[in-house]
């Protein structure tokens, strides 16, 4: 924030004027030891689990281990200023972060403090970072789609509002790219996005911010960054802080999408904190509650019904459901999905998008493995037209995978098999999509329709992408009403099918690619 | 520090139970305080940690300080502490013993820190207020601390009620820094 020197005295004056000195009774203890961001405090026998502790110089900590004669706490910030014998005050509050629409377009740390040099955030309310997930009564089943704008995701592994869809894959397989594309595609849909970066390089986070800004997607997005240089405690709480910010939108009857990038690093940070707190290590040295660490976080992503929204807003918002969709990211090591954290998160989520290095290196990007990727609840939420047309694509790819091994003996195969192979190759090619270029439902439907009806069959494989691009442009230019009709109704019927056929026939004869 | 309390707690509690059964809380308390003073002396620590001095000698030596050495239980307690090498935690054991004693007698120890001397009638009214607040008998320990500038600071167990000017200034400073 830049302050004009003449304003400083005014600011100080108003601060002194408005300052209200409170006298309250509080609990006090003393620091016994400080080690690697972990502080042992003696004397605060009434501390709560997860309570915010105040250290000198406005440094805060969080009580995690409540033992008989001492409290183990993690420092949120610079622990080097704390020394033995310092006074610790209990605040009587569970750790809270600011929430609200004021945070949109901002980059904040795990405590909700701005780190983007754009001045203070004037948030009207705060929310505890750890909250109990909505219960059975408050929930509603998932039946509205979150359009990611990626053909391969929306057609094959659809995501619904309130769903938890895992993005899993090795390093350098485009996990973040899928998530960022999904965020960019929420522009103008009213879905608010939260991107939580955990343990990433600060330069990577900066790049994400820049890309979102470039695509005009930052204004509906909150970025919560706990970079690799931040303390393990900050990395551990970042997802919970982001979740609290997302829950705000869910609870006022809006839709939000949260990306946790990535939960493997959060589990590492939590492992570090736990080991330093001397909690006993278990499998892969993770503490015993590493499953609960992720299950309680992801359980908070939910769709809640109209009554729950009405209750939560004291009747101000009526007849609206709220949702928080989660896209956690997990990085595997050498494709090992049977490691501890990946298996945990796979079992918690409602499906996964499985990305593979081999596909990525073969140029199939997004590198989605269509066989292993599933969405357990998304089908109910999928846009009708994409659902109808996407079925064929899935089938073609499944058949192609079975036959792919024979593709080397192409000359010895019968015609039907050959046709399936050709179709499969073209559909695989069609499922490629450049980064930062999400497609509308109409564009996606056209591509899927063209694939199903064999419009690609006589196109050379290398020409499939230019063909698709030219087709979209031709239809958008010459059949604007059809594009609008599909995007508006999202429905599939004979009328739309006929119109698509006419448009594509016209393109085939007149178009250039 | 906190570990010392964990080690000392069972001994403090056991001593308290014995003293309660024998109906000799006061004499135990006096003796323990005396021993704790003796043991916290640095010279004494050297003597007790000297490998050339065996347990029996140190027991006799420590027993010689006791007012009423006829209490067999106290002598046994002391010999147990020496045998288990916990005699160095005498200070903590005494603290735990005393806190249990005060709890048993329904008395709360309140430390009052003040910038200036407090008139007896003022202290009296403060104590009666605190008695009402904590619903127990209150025993106040007054200390003078010029650093507080003005006002008083009341400490009881872990609870702190800070009514000093220093606290107000600190709060204001923090408000202005941010």
Image (cartoon, coloured by chain):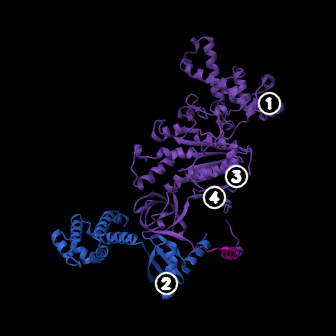
Quadrant occupied by the N terminus of chain B: bottom left
Q: Give the labeled residue for mark 3.
A: A313
**Image quadrant assignment for residue B20:** bottom left
On screen, B119 above or below A339? below
Q: Is A195 displayed left or right of A72 in the figure?
A: right
Chain bearing tag 1 is A
Q: CA distance from mark 2 to mark 3?
A: 51 Å
Going from the N terminus, do you reach mark 4 or mark 1 first? 4
Q: Which residues are magenta?
A: A8-20
Magenta segment includes A281: no
Residue A95, how many percent across, how many down?
56, 58
Chain bearing tag 4 is A
Q: Is B105 displayed left or right of A156 in the figure?
A: left
Q: Find numbered disc 2 in the image and state the secondary structure of the residue it sits on.
A: helix
Q: Find numbered disc 3 in the image and state the secondary structure of the residue it sits on.
A: loop
Chain with blue colouring: B
Chain bearing tag 3 is A
**Image quadrant assignment for residue A137:** top right
State whether discs 1 and 2 lie on one chain.
no
Q: Give the labeled residue for mark 2.
A: B124
Please tell me which residue lies in front, B108 or A69: B108
Q: Give the labeled residue for mark 4.
A: A126
On screen, B33 above or below A257? below
Chain with purple colouring: A
Q: CA distance from mark 1 to mark 2?
A: 91 Å
Q: Give the labeled residue for mark 1.
A: A475
């Amino acid at each position: 924030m830049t302050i004009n020197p003449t304003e400083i005295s005014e600011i100080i004056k108003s601060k002194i004027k408005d300052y209200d000195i409170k006298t309250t009774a509080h609990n006090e203890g003393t620091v016994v030891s400080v080690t690697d961001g972990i502080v042992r405090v003696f004397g605060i026998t009434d501390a709560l689990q997860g309570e915010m502790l105040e250290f000198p110089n406005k440094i805060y900590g969080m009580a995690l281990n409540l033992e008989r004669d001492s409290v183990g706490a993690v420092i949120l910030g610079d622990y080097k200023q704390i020394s033995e014998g310092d006074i610790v005050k209990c605040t009587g509050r569970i750790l809270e972060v600011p929430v609200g629409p004021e945070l949109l377009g901002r980059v904040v740390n795990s405590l909700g403090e701005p780190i983007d040099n754009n001045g203070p955030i004037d948030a009207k309310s705060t929310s505890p970072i750890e909250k109990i997930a909505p219960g059975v009564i408050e929930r509603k089943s998932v039946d509205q789609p979150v359009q990611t704008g990626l053909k391969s995701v929306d057609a094959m592994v659809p995501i619904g509002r309130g769903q938890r869809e895992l993005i899993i894959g090795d390093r350098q397989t485009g996990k973040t790219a899928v998530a960022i594309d999904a965020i960019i595609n929420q522009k103008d849909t009213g879905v608010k996005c939260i991107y939580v970066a955990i343990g990433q390089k600060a330069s990577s986070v900066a790049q994400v911010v820049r890309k979102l800004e470039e695509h005009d997607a930052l204004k509906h997005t909150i970025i919560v960054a706990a970079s690799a240089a931040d303390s393990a405690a900050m990395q551990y709480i970042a997802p919970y802080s982001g979740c609290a910010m997302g829950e705000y939108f869910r609870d006022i009857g809006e839709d939000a999408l949260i990306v946790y990038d990535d939960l493997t690093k959060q589990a590492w940070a939590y492992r570090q904190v736990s080991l330093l707190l001397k909690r006993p290590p278990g499998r892969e040295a993770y503490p015993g509650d590493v499953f609960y660490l992720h299950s309680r976080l992801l359980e908070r992503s939910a769709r809640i019904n109209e009554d729950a929204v009405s209750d939560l807003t004291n009747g101000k918002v009526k007849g609206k459901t709220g949702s928080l969709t989660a896209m956690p990211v997990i990085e595997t090591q050498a494709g090992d999905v049977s490691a501890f954290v990946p298996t945990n998160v796979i079992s918690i989520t409602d499906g996964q998008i499985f990305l593979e290095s081999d596909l990525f290196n073969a140029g199939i990007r997004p590198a989605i493995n269509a066989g292993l990727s599933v969405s357990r609840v998304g089908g109910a939420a999928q846009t009708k037209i994409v659902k109808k047309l996407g079925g064929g694509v899935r089938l073609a790819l499944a058949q192609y995978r079975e036959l792919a091994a024979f593709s080397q003996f192409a000359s010895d195969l019968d015609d039907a098999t050959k046709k399936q192979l050709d179709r499969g190759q073209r559909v695989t090619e069609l499922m490629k999509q450049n980064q930062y270029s999400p497609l509308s439902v109409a564009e996606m439907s056209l591509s899927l329709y063209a694939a199903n009806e064999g419009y690609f069959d006589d196109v050379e494989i290398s020409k499939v992408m230019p063909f698709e691009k030219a087709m979209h442009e031709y239809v958008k230019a010459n059949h604007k009403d059809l594009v609008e009709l599909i995007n508006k109704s999202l429905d599939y019927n004979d009328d739309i099918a006929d119109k698509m056929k006419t448009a594509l026939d016209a393109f085939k004869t007149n178009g250039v690619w | 520090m906190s570990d010392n309390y964990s080690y000392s707690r069972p001994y403090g509690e056991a001593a308290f139970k014995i003293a309660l059964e024998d109906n000799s809380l006061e004499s135990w308390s006096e003796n323990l305080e005396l021993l704790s003073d003796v043991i916290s002396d640095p010279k004494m620590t050297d003597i007790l940690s000297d490998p050339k001095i065996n347990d029996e000698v140190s027991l006799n030596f420590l027993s010689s300080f006791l007012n009423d050495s006829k209490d067999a239980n106290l002598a046994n307690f002391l010999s147990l502490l020496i045998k288990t090498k916990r005699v160095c935690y005498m200070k903590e054991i005494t603290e735990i013993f005393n806190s249990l004693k005060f709890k048993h007698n329904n008395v709360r120890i309140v430390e009052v820190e003040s910038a200036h001397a407090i008139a007896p009638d003022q202290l009296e009214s403060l104590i009666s207020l605190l008695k009402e607040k904590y619903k127990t008998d209150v025993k106040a320990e007054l200390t003078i601390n010029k650093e507080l500038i003005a006002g008083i600071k009341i400490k009881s167990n872990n609870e702190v009620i800070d009514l000093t000017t220093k606290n107000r200034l600190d709060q204001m400073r923090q408000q202005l820094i941010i």
